[in-house]
Amino acid sequence: MRIANNACIRVFCKEDEDKKLVIEKIKLLLPFDLEKEKIKLEWQRAEGFDRKRMHVIKAALTKNRYVNAFIQNLLDKLGDGKKTLLEQLDSRLDNDLNFFMRLDKDMLTKGKFVLTDSGNCYHIRINIASFPKKREKAVAVLKGLLR
């Protein structure tokens, strides 16, 4: 069953941060081998508010089996975070049926999946699949996943 059309993980990595560790934690979110599956991480250079350089590292998933495996892995590790997502479902789902969440970067470094509202995080966007493409259908899909 198609849960989502695509998913994206994005993280900002400052110059003084350990890039290997940041990438390692992206891989922790994905229950498959990126190299073996030929999924490339995208890198962009950016400049922060304080004019410091940083990288934006992004993993884009478009194949159904990767998207579903990622979502299942994420939900398995979120624990009580699923309850929070369910309570905040309305504010996390936009009109294009994108579902957003952020995982605390420092906590993920310790192997813990903790939701946050701060900017120091892994940004996750999941485009929910529903037919017809209506918010009500997407809400039903999400409620089924999060319960």
Image (tube, rainbow, N blue to C red):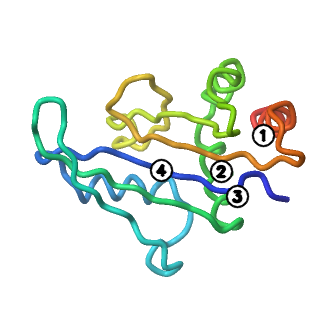
User: Residue at coordinates 54% horizontally, 34% vertically from top-left?
Assistant: 101
User: Circle 1 sits on which residue?
Assistant: 145
In the drawing, what numbered circle is on residue 71? 2
- Given this view, does label 4 or label 2 mark the residue nearer the observer? 4
- Given this view, does label 1 or label 4 mark the residue nearer the observer? 4
Q: Hey, what amino acid is under mark 2?
A: Ile
Please tell me how crowded label 1 is: few (under 14), some (14-19), or many (20+) other residues with Cα within 10 Å.
some
User: Circle 4 sits on which residue?
Assistant: 9
Q: Earlier in the sequence, mark 1 or mark 4?
A: 4
In the drawing, what numbered circle is on residue 68? 3
Q: Quadrant of residue 21?
A: bottom left
Please tell me how crowded label 4 is: few (under 14), some (14-19), or many (20+) other residues with Cα within 10 Å.
many
Q: Quadrant of residue 57?
A: bottom left
Cβ–Cβ under 8 Å for marks 1 and 4: no
Disc 3 from disc 1: Cα separation: 11 Å
User: Residue at coordinates 70% horizontally, 39% vertically from top-left?
Assistant: 97
